[in-house]
Amino acid sequence: MALYCSSLGSQVPRAGRALLAGACSRGLSASSSIEASPLLRSGGFIGGRWVTVAATFPVLDPASGTELHRVSDCGLPESREAVTAAYNAFQSWREVSAKDRSVLLRKWYELMIQNKEELAKIITAENGKPLKEALGEVAYSAAFLEWFSEEARRVYGDIIPVPMKDRRALALKQPLGVVTIITPWNFPSAMITRKVGAALAAGCTVIVKPAEDTPLSALALAELATQAGIPAGVFNVVPCSRQNAASVGEALCTDPLVAKISFTGSTTTGKILLKHAADGVKRVSMELGGHAPFVVFDTANVDQAVAGAIASKYRNSGQTCVCSNRFLVQKGIHDTFVKKFAEAIKKELHVGNGFEASTTQGPLINEKAVEKVEKHVSDAVNQGACIVTGGKRHSLGKNFFEPTLLSNVTTSMLCTQEETFGPLAPVIKFDTEEEALAISNSANVGLAGYFYSQDPAQIWRVAERMEVGMVGVNEGLLSSVECPFGGVKQSGIGREGSKYGIDEYLEIKYVCFGGL
């Protein structure tokens, strides 16, 4: 979901590389790296103030399993309080000029850049991704605030010609109201700003429920929002434990004062939230699960395809919704691709703690995630797949898994039927373009897809026929704040980022002037 990759250290800002080197030379643990952070917070953030409750839940370091920090376990009272605060703030925020909203978002962006090292350390500590990837996420995350600070001033309506001489018609765009935003753990900062930047630019107010694994990044953003001057109640954060997640989520989605739900996460959870939205006929944005095909045709540049495969598959240890999940390689270059792919994995990928300089692949978020990868590998091997490299947990700890490549994979195996969300690359051999498209389009989801070809005619055919919302042609990384992000089929509803993203938070009102 970004323009950076663990193997692309040159894309990390110079100051960030210095931070990385310094942190690693001192051998910092996740807990010691954030315990003195000025952005570390424990309470919920509601109506412009920090709210603590008696019950707390632990945030764990996925690399070691140790406790990093304890955070207030908000419940139904805090959820209702947050909705009320957001609703009251909306009455004045909607009247703030687009220029003034733009200035505040820009200030928030600047504060994120000024505090990028602290934000990155928090991400690495609670998520586990390598620090250089975390720095990339912070830059990507901040860029959404910058982008939508500019888009705030470009919410244009229309004058509509009508046949009646005594009438004039126009279309106005107005903010929806209070928005509930539910975000995942794999990009704990960027998935917030991509939604919140658009919502605030449009004139909406928000309540963020961050993932229970990674609430610290959301709370750090709240601290910076305060420093930026975002008015009380405009941006609220309600953290809660896994045990409270369902009830808090339902309360934030069904409250009659909430006008819209924006969610990034699994298709299963998305369907539950859609049911919550149905009773109130609320607007929704859903960025749900993916199962991205990565197709390599005989016409491809193999070395280019291998580089794209490494970047797409193993970023964030394979824990992105747009990472490649099924590799389809045409028979003419299959063996060459698999050989070079395996060599690149062994040479370029280094498993370790995210705070170590050499690390390109950190731990998975928790043991449940590791168990799913193990299940997919075991199922594939039992059905005849071959382990080319990797295939088991790494000796570093229970949440680490070796970068894995499988060959002799078929479409009947679990790893080609459902999203793995881990460092597993299964390769299927195919014969024809039609076969590759049939396999690619067989899934009931369609978020991202990738293919490599040097044939212009084939590029046009496949790009148009691949049933996904985003296509990477000879490119393994496709996200950019300027471009629309979203899927088709059961991968979701709506688009985020780009000039289209702000429309998700606006209503169109038709006004007819008569008697002229």
Image (cartoon, helix red, strand yellow):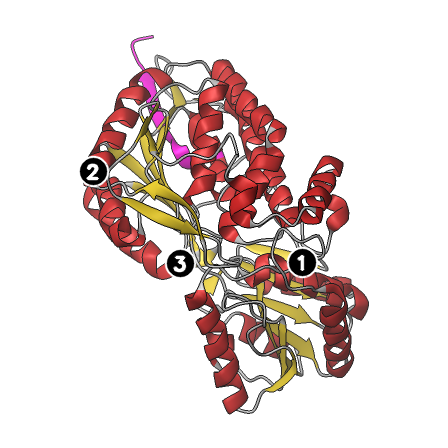
Tell me the amino acid under the disc marked 3: Ser
- Compared with 153, 463 (above or below) is below
Q: Are marks 1 and 2 in contact (CB under 8 Å)?
A: no
Q: Residue at x 78, y 71 (%)?
A: 299
> Which type of secondary structure does the marked residue at label 2 adopt?
loop
The nearer-to-camera label among 1 and 3 is 1
- The residue to which callout 2 is attached is 255
Q: Earlier in the sequence, mark 3 or mark 2?
A: 2
Give the magenta-colored segment's residue range: 502-516
Percent position of residue 434, x then y: 61, 76
Q: Earlier in the sequence, mark 1 or mark 2?
A: 2
| Percent x, y of residue 507 | 36, 30
**In the rendering, which numbered label is found on residue 360?**
1
Please, what secondary structure does the residue beneath circle 3 have?
Answer: loop
Looking at the image, can residue 406 be seen?
yes
How dense is the environment of label 2, judged by Cα within 10 Å: few (below 14), some, or many (20 and up)? some
State yes or no: discs 3 and 2 in contact (Cβ < 8 Å): no
Q: Tell me which numbered mark, 1 or 3, is placed earlier along the sequence.
A: 3
- Given residues 127 and 155, the one toward you in this image is 127
Q: Is residue 277 visible?
A: no
- Magenta-drawn stretch contains 510: yes
Tell me the distance, in whole angstroms, between the alpha carbons under discs 3 and 2.
22 Å
Amino acid found under the numbered disc labelled 1? Thr
State how far apart marks 1 and 3 are (Cα): 25 Å
Q: Where residue 343 sits: x, y (%)?
A: 77, 74
Disc 3 designates what residue? Answer: 266
Q: Residues within 10 Å of mark 1 (few under 14, many from 20)?
A: many
Say which mark, if any, is on residue 180.
none
